[in-house]
Image: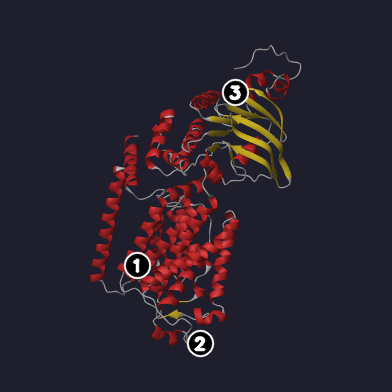
Amino acid sequence: MKTNKLSWMIAFVLLALMFAGLYVLEQTLPPTTMLFTILKKSVIYALIAVSMNLLNGFTGLFSLGQAGFMVVGAYTFAILTIPVQHRAMVYQYYDGGIVQFALPAALGILAAGAVAAVFAFLVGLPVLRLKSDYLAIATLGFAEIIRAFIQYEGLGPLTNGSNLLRRFPTFTGIIPPFAIVAFCIFIIVMLIHSTYGRALKAIRDDETAAEAMGINLFFHKQLSFVISSFFAGVAGALLAMYQGSIQAASFKSSMTYEILLIVVIGGMGSISGSILASFLFIASSEWWLRFLDNELFIGTFKVPLLRSGFRVVVFSVIIMAVVLFYRRGIMGDREFNLRFLTRGRSKAKERKNG
Amino acid sequence: MSLLTVTDLKVSYGGIEALKSISFDVRKGQIVTLIGANGAGKSTTLRAISGLVPVIGGSINFDGREITSLDTSKIVSEGIVMVPEGRKVFPNLSVLENLKIGAYLRTNADEISASIEYVYERFPRLKERHWQMAGTLSGGEQQMLAVGRALMARPKLLMMDEPSLGLAPLVVKDIFRIIHRLRDEGITILLIEQNANAALRAADYGYVLETGRITMEGEGATLLNDPKVRDAYLGHAKGKKSSEPEVK
């Protein structure tokens, strides 16, 4: 109990330090620095990865619908928050669209989560009765259908068809996305540590035994699915704010696979693993490995292999190496907390003595 | 007085009648056992009582209340808890978390802590290992955890599905000692076993199940000495003398 309290205190101090650090960075570096772009995208992916981990890692439901709920969230947010004076321009082919009001961004984000959650509830009713692979296929199907549906001409006045949605509010700094994501992940962590969270893990470990203990399987799966999708919706809204414009066509299933990759690399069932992996994944795929795409001359010697596209090759090799050497992901199902640190130390001690 | 009365229970899986019509009684404060070969319908009976498989006919009455076709969570709240076959502890949860899952339908935190202490008192090994992942326990410890987890739901009737399966003989003895102790503490026990010898020795009353029907019943000791039961379930081939010393 005592270490528990201490852990929370340390977590809050670290969070405060992180925000202080971000503030200092924002004051000293120009806002167009690559670092900010990467940090913003990473933190948004961290939320999606954690929401997917809640489902795949903690409840044992193999769902591939994340991109579908993100596109629902992103569109809900955009449709509800584009300022009225810009609507005529954004919806130029649809006479300004049918929505003629605009919500503040915060409400738009909440609505994004809520609408995604409602979709999840409806989709979950039939789909959550399926098991493993079938569930994955059904949720993947949903994500594809909803993406096509949004682009349907008939929905143009609402969704702008296959055209871009833009001119909605975006982030003014780096603090807001971090604050929103930190709050969302905090809620998910609280859920996992609650009685509900324990029931979810029990279902993941053994459905039959969980059911025999009186745990209502369907209710808990639905709960996990709806909450996970709520946060995927919120993350969709944040991604829209980050990008400044959205188009349904960009929310492909490859996006879900990217997130799945992050979850697996971080460790199924580890929140801190998902967060860590998001930052590493985004930074390496978009930033650290960039130099591999440019031809490089040392004197007159042209370094071989370096050319446009080589980055992807190296990145794939790194991922394979990680999966080979960390079968259960970087963190396994452990969390980066006090116990993790002290256990690491005692293990090192054992090794030294032994 | 009977705690559980099963009347003409019928269950079928995908067109196959697993239970053809079985009736039996479990008296309060007794250990009652269902014995029978593989596929006789023992597990199905327990699963039907727990509400885990749909019942297509007959009735199940518990403590004066009709519980046929109730949800499992309601049945558990009524006081019928099952220790599933093969233990089925939650391997990636700690021992303590496993116990807490057992109390899932209870809400009073103080009472739950008291129950945890109650379980620890009976199984000191679980207390020693409360932080350990259940999957790392030995088979016997897992069986104790499975029983402890079931006790967390404060059962009036504890149903045990093959508790001795895959355990070393010494551990099996321990398990049966625990079953007796629980009975003495007032918990009624419905036990199903392939190990008919051990089950009938432990039981106050027994039923023999054959392909979905009950073919015999009687007090544990009576069945144990019944030649037909001995031939079919106790490994005494025909022609062997019954005076032969028994393996203990």
Side (left or right) of B216 relative to A195: right
Spatial distance from mark 2 to mark 3, Cα to Cα? 82 Å
Instruction: Give the amino acid at mark 1.
Output: Pro
- Asked if residue B68 can be seen in this view, the reply is yes
B214 versus A281 height, above or below: above
Residue holding disc 2: A93
Residue at image mark 1: A177
Identify the mark nearer the N-term, 2 or 1. 2
Q: Nearer the viewer, mark 3 or mark 1?
A: 3
Residue extending furthest right? B239
Residue A76: give x, y in percent of width and height.
Answer: 46, 73
Q: Chain of mark 2?
A: A
The x and y percentages for residue A13 are 26, 55
Q: Which residue is mark 3?
A: B204
Res A212 → quadrant: top right
Judging depth in this view, the residue of A202 and B29 nearest the camera is: B29
